[in-house]
Amino acid sequence: MRLGIVSDIHDNLQALDQAIAEMGKVDELICAGDACYQFRFSNGVAQRLRECGARYVLGNHEDILLSPAGIRAQESPKVDRELLEWTRQQPHSLRTDVGGKKLLIFHATPWEPYSEYLYPNSPDLKRLAAEDADFIIYGHTHYQLETRIGGSLVINPGSTGEPRDPGNDFQVSYAVLDTETEEVVFGNFPDPTRVIRRHSG
C-alpha cells in the first residue's frame, strides 16, 4: 500500500492540495494532527481531509480550538458546524493495520503529557521502541524524520503548512510510505501562500 502522510497543515489549504497532487495516487491519506491553527478553523482543510477519507488524529491545536477556551472560535458564523463536529469525532491516536502490518499514529507522543517535541536528535525517541508497531507516524515538530527504532519505522512528514525545518530549506512537506518495500519518499516545495510574485516592468 502507498500511504500519503501530511501533518501540521495549520489551515494551509493551498499547501495541502499541492501535497495531495504531488504525492499521486495513494491508498490512504494520513494526517498526524494540527490541521487547524489555534483559534482558527479551516472549513476547506477539514472538508478536504474528509473528502479524502483521511485517517486523522487530533493535535494540540485542535485541543485548543475544541476546548472551552475556543468557544468563540467554534461559534463563529464562518465555521461549518458539520465539519467542526466531524473534527471533534477524530481520535487523539490510532492503532490500525495496513497491508498486514501494524500502524500507530499520534501527534506528539504516545505518553503523557502528550505534548513533548520529539525532534530527530531527541533522546526520548528511543522510548518508541516499546511500541508494538511496524510503522509509527507522528508530527508536532515540523521536522522531517525517517528512522528505525526497535522494530518500528518511525516517520514524521514535517509540516504541510508552516515550514520550520532548516533541513529542507524551510519548505512545506509531506511523505509517502510504501508499506511493502518500507520505502519513504519526502516531497518538499515552497509554501504557496508565501511565494513572492515578481512583476515585470
Image: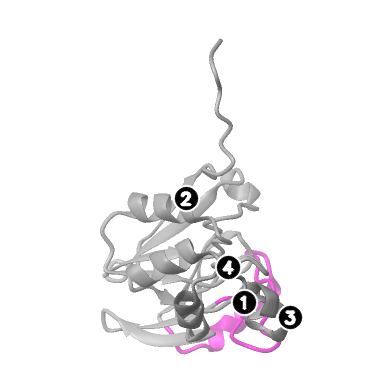
Task: State how far apart marks 2 and 4 are (Cα).
Answer: 15 Å
Disc 4 to disc 1: CB gap under 8 Å: no
Q: Which residue is mark 3?
A: 69
Q: Secondary structure at mark 4?
A: loop
Could one spot residue 142 in this view of the protein?
yes
Q: Nearer the viewer, mark 4 or mark 1?
A: 1
Distance from disc 3 to disc 2, alpha carbons, whole Å, reads: 28 Å
The residue indicated by pointer 2 is 14
In the rendered structure, which disc, 3 or 1, sits on the residue that comes first in sequence?
3
Q: Label 3, label 1: how many angstroms apart (C-alpha)?
A: 12 Å
Queried whether the magenta region covers residue 112, the answer comes back as yes
For the residues labelled 4 and 1, the Cα–Cα distance comes to: 11 Å
Disc 4/disc 3 C-alpha distance (Å): 14 Å
Mark 2 in CB contact with mark 1 (< 8 angstroms): no
**Image depth: mark 2 or mark 4 in front:** 4
User: Residue at horizontal 33%, vertical 73%?
Assistant: 53
**Position of 188 relative to 46 (above/below):** above
In this view, the residue farthest toward the front is: 77
Residue 133 badge: none
Q: Which residue is mark 1?
A: 75
Instruction: Report the amino acid beneath label 1.
Output: Glu
Q: Residue at x 41, y 71 (%)?
A: 30
Main SS type for the magenta part? Answer: loop
The residue sitting at 38% across, 72% down in the picture is 50
